[in-house]
Image (cartoon, rainbow, N blue to C red):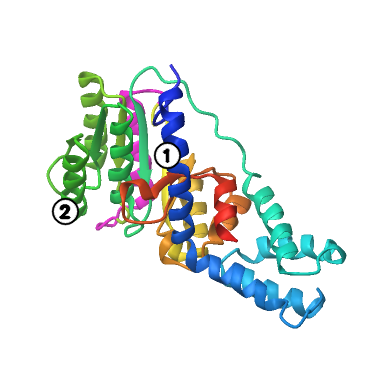
Amino acid sequence: MAFTWFKNNDEVKEENQEKSTGFLNRLRKGLSKTQKVLSTDINELFAGNRKIDDELLEELEELLITSDMGVRTTMDLIQSISKKSSEISGADQLKKALKEKILALLNSEKPYQEKITTGPHVIMVIGVNGVGKTTTIGKLSAKFVASGKKVIIAAADTFRAAAVEQLTIWAQRAGVEIVKHKEMSDPAAVAYDGIEAALARGADVVLVDTAGRIHTRKNLMEELKKIKRAISKKLPEAPHEILLVLDATTGQNALSQAELFNDALDVTGIALTKLDGTAKGGIVVSICSMLEIPLKYIGIGEKIEDLQEFDSVRFVDALF
């Protein structure tokens, strides 16, 4: 059977329509710092009836890099605007041209081929410490439960006591089961037991937390590969997803992290957190255009509903 995401069909359509306006407002609020850079400052570029020339393009380039679009993505955008410069006579037309090009960049990633699963859907969640892995797992758990799924969390970050404590709180809050071992035990064994428990108890989803830093001489990537192998040993087609959590406030560093983790583990999706805390929301565009990894979720606040599936059209609408 194919794994079914959150809610489905007619009963949800109405609910989604009601929520969409609220979410767009929250998205705009969450992206307000980036929006100020891109929208307000672009308006100021055209003060005094300026026309698009090399000087204005240079100032626009600086704005885009400030919002963390990245140098290569910024160059693509500037080149596109330069070609259309004769058609652009004001801020609104420039924003429209930018929106069209940014949307094209956001939609350039390869579509993710969802695997057909016969047991629980296993999501291995990875990322360095401090990016919001635990919170993301908690919010995803709550969303899956709200859509009628039975969820088990495997607390495989055994190197950090606080991680297990925080996950336990989230598990209680979301009403899901948690599989945990004592501190400093083998993370791969926890992951294996999590899958075993899910199979025995008929769970639909398993979320496997992992370490973001190792307190011994062991290599983090090797430890994560070991966890991945342990999961596959118990359930051959798993993990079905490897979700990388990145912190938007780290800007271009997030891109470097994504490349490292992807080289080692073949990441299938990205969750980008803390977009509400930065003026560098352009990192979303940079990630989508530079990496061939789907951006699945964005986090724009503390509430459970502030972790949302990424929608490129809504995102671009909220940016300008």
Above or below, 234 against 295 in this view is above
Q: Position of residue 154 (x, y in %)?
A: 24, 37
Q: CA distance from mark 2 to mark 1?
A: 23 Å
Q: Residue at x 79, y 79 (%)?
A: 50
Please give the range of residues in magenta.
214-237
Q: Quadrant of residue 301?
A: bottom left
Residue 179 visible from this viewpoint: yes
| Mark drawn on residue 242 | 1
Question: Amino acid type of disc 1?
Answer: Ile
Above or below, 159 against 152 in this view is below
Q: Position of residue 203 (x, y in %)?
A: 26, 24
Residue 3 visible from this viewpoint: no
Q: Left of 69 or right of it: where is 134? A: left
Q: Is residue 301 magenta?
A: no
| Mark drawn on residue 94 | none
Q: Upstream in the sequence, badge 2 or badge 1?
A: 2
Between residue 72 and residue 185, name the one nearer to us. 72
Q: Residues within 10 Å of mark 2 (few under 14, many from 20)?
A: few
Report the residue marked by disc 2.
161
Above or below, 305 against 175 in this view is below
Q: Residue at x 41, y 25 (%)?
A: 11
Type of secondary structure dominating the magenta stretch: helix
Q: Is residue 236 magenta?
A: yes
Between residue 304 and residue 71, name the one nearer to us. 304
Q: Residue at x 74, y 58 (%)?
A: 97
Q: Residue at x 49, y 46 (%)?
A: 262
Q: Position of residue 161 (x, y in %)?
A: 16, 53
Secondary structure, mark 1, is strand
